Amino acid sequence: MTFRVLGVGSSLRNKASSTTALSIALNLASKYGAETRLFDLRQNKLPLYDPGENNSSLEIKKIQEDVSWADALILSTPDYHGSMSGAMKNFLDYFWAEFAGKTFGYICASHEKGLTAMDQMRTAVRQCYGWSMPYGVSLNDSEDFTDGKMNPKLESRLDMLARDLVVYGTILRQQFVKDLGDSDNAFASRYRK
Ligand SMILES: Cc1cc2nc3c(=O)[nH]c(=O)nc-3n(C[C@H](O)[C@H](O)[C@H](O)COP(=O)(O)O)c2cc1C
């Protein structure tokens, strides 16, 4: 079965560096055998999450389908005040059980390495029983792109992220799916139907 990776870009800026890096990471993931999709929140704006609404817009249906389809996700954000973007937090608010047993990678465009922003995404994912890669990739738009070309060190980090997400994500996902069908005392047991 092909491993499926969904990238979620959350900068609303035209030609956002975080979304550019995400697209490259997805291309690299396909080099490692994954099928990929990009959901760019700039192109597909989600309404502010409202638990009282029936959430049936076309964009919401599309992202629900994409998240269910995915075995792993790469979340990409600009660093806003040491945090993820509001668009990313709003995307995360729509989901819970759909993240369980999936592996998440992180990208952050920042002038300060983006560690706190990536940690916040990790916290939200952990709350939903997703697995997180132990490192993320940060980039600095003014230093990592010159004349439209990407710093090779950044490309190498994105390549490692793509490779590790496919390799480790596949192992974790296969075990989770197996656990769904077994009767072991596994954390997947709460997601059995
Ligand atoms: C509202 C706002 C808050 C920001 N806060 C920070 C910050 O706390 N730390 C930082 O390093 N950069 C901060 N930035 C700069 C962006 O993170 C930076 O320009 C980033 O490269 C934008 O990513 P993008 O190209 O994907 O849109 C902020 C930018 C905006 C618009």
Image (tube, rainbow, N blue to C red):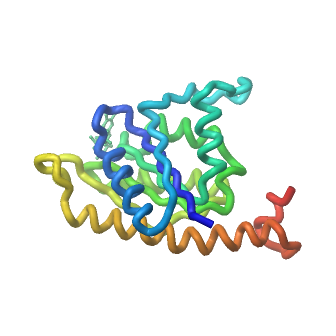
Q: Residue at x 48, y 35 (%)?
A: 87
Judge whether 108 appears above or below 44 on screen: below
Position of residue 191 measured from the top left corner of the image (x, y, whole percent): 80, 58
Quadrant housing the C terminus: bottom right
Could you tell me if residue 115 is visible in this image?
A: no
Tally of marks? 0
Residue at left offset 57%, top offset 30%: 59
**Of 5 and 120, the residue lying toward us:** 5
Q: Quadrant of residue 29?
A: bottom left
Compared with 125, 155 (above or below) is below
Q: In screen coordinates, is 60 left or right of 54?
A: left
Residue at the left extreme? 147
Depicted 43 relative to depicted 3: above or below? above
At 52% from the left edge and 40% from the top edge, which residue is drawn?
A: 89
Q: Nearer the viewer, residue 180 or 136?
A: 180
Q: Is residue 63 above or below residue 58?
A: below
Image-quadrant location for residue 153 = bottom left
Quadrant assignment for the N terminus: bottom right
Q: Position of residue 181 (x, y in %)?
A: 83, 68
- Tell whether 23 sits left or right of 167: left
Ligand 1, image quadrant it occupies: top left
In the rendered view, does 138 fall on the left or right side of 49? left
Expressed as whole percent of the image width and height from the top left, the position of residue 110 reads 30, 49
* Image quarter of residue 162: bottom left
On the image, the x and y values in percent for residue 119 come to: 47, 56
Query: Which residue shows up at 61% across the image and 27% down it?
Result: 58
Q: Nearer the viewer, residue 62 or 127?
A: 62
Quick check: can you spot residue 39?
yes
